Amino acid sequence: MGSINFEKTDMNLNIMAALTFAALSAVGNAMFAFGQKRAELVENPFLFLALTMTTCLILFCITIPFFPNVKAFSYAVNNALWIGISGLGFYFTFIGFYFLYTRFGASYYVVYAVFSILTTSIVVGILVFKESFNIYHLLSVFCAIVTVVLFSVGQRMTQS
């Protein structure tokens, strides 16, 4: 009576931290989708994306001094391959978002989210990095796939 189970508390704090970071990312993505839908459509989609990433880069440069100082050049050299792969990933993500949001709308994000679950959680997390996976994770993936099926049915019903 009155004792605290620290393992359970730590797990709850970890879940809360993960949910907080996920929510921050979700709000940021919603802001990105909102801005992209409101911006004028131009012949060259890379103009919006380049200006958006320039704004992002400026904000990163402003916040860098608030975190521990590291040797940036040696870090960049040691991690050039991974930085390149991640940069290419951002490039594909932003191009995909641009065409998804401008041609189909922000509601189609649900399709991207499920593909993200499959590619990031399953391929990268489980297959590449061997992260833990149990029946509940499997059920959540199944539910995500059902989400896309239901979304597709809903889209067909709306268009008919």
Image (tube, grey):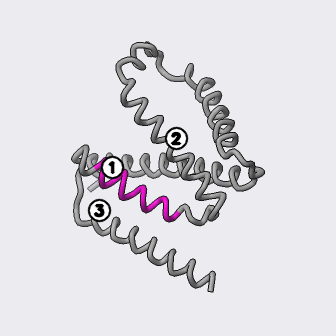
Q: Give the residue displayed 44% in from the left and 76% down from the top.
A: 149
Q: Earlier in the sequence, mark 1 or mark 2?
A: 1
User: Which tag is nearer the camera, tag 1 or tag 2?
Assistant: 2
Residue linked to disc 1: 9
> Residue 39, image x and y in percent?
75, 50
Question: Which label sits on residue 137?
Answer: 3
Q: Main secondary structure of the magenta part?
A: helix
User: Dot 3: what SS?
Assistant: helix
Residue linked to disc 2: 91
Q: Which residues are magenta?
A: 110-125
Q: Earlier in the sequence, mark 1 or mark 3?
A: 1
Q: Amino acid at mark 1?
A: Thr
Name above or below for residue 1 compared with residue 156: above
Give neighbour class at mark 3: few <14, some 14-19, many 20+ (Cα, 10 Å): few
Q: Amino acid at mark 2?
A: Tyr
Q: Is residue 82 magenta?
A: no
Residue 101 left/right relative to 88: right
